[in-house]
Image (tube, rainbow, N blue to C red):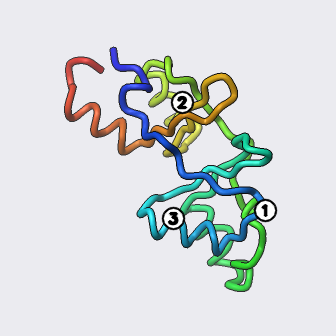
Amino acid sequence: MIKVREIMVSPVITIDSEATVEEACRIMGEKHIGSVIITEAGKPSGIFTERDLLTKILLNDHSLMKEKVKKFMSSPLTVITPDFDLREAARIMTQLKIRRLPVVHMDQLVGIITSADITRAIGENPLNI
């Protein structure tokens, strides 16, 4: 069985909750990623995704780009530990209809796993899942 630690992406791109939506979008664009983890006092508190940008901002008002990202982040944050079984992580993501799960160890953000990571792992190791 594959553990989350074997396929998670690390380090995770984070941004402080006081940053603007524009800053979050710039980082996501520069890094070619679909989300950033939002932190408060160095601890993960939410996630800002492409979907948040589309459904909470662009469909409403372009002037919101100067607003604080914490206003639009998805929260509370669902997290898992590196020892989670990949199947269990996939089940949680399916049940909650989310595509990303931050990985936390001893209250520290250590990685992130996405639906694309799970798909890649299944493709590379179909018998070990």
Which residue position holds label 3?
28
Secondary structure beneath disc 3? helix
Vertical order, 76 against 88 (above or below): below
| Most distant residue in the top direction | 1
The image position of residue 78, as x and y in percent, is 65, 36
Which residue position holds label 2?
92
* Residue ID at (62%, 77%): 58
Instruction: Tell me if 127 is positioned left or right of 8 in this view.
Output: left
Vertical order, 104 against 25 (above or below): above
| Disc 3 packing (10 Å; few <14; some 14–19; many ≥20) | some
- Who is closer to the viewer here, 124 or 106? 106
Q: Quadrant of residue 52?
A: bottom right
Secondary structure beneath disc 1? loop
Which residue position holds label 1?
18
Please name the amino acid that badge 1 sits on: Glu
In contact (CB < 8 Å): disc 3 and disc 2? no
Please name the amino acid that badge 3 sits on: Met
For marks 3 and 2 on the same chain, the one whose residue lies earlier in the sequence: 3
**What is the quadrant of the C terminus in the image?**
top left
For marks 1 and 2 on the same chain, the one whose residue lies earlier in the sequence: 1
Please name the amino acid that badge 2 sits on: Ile
State the CA–CA distance, disc 1 to disc 2: 29 Å
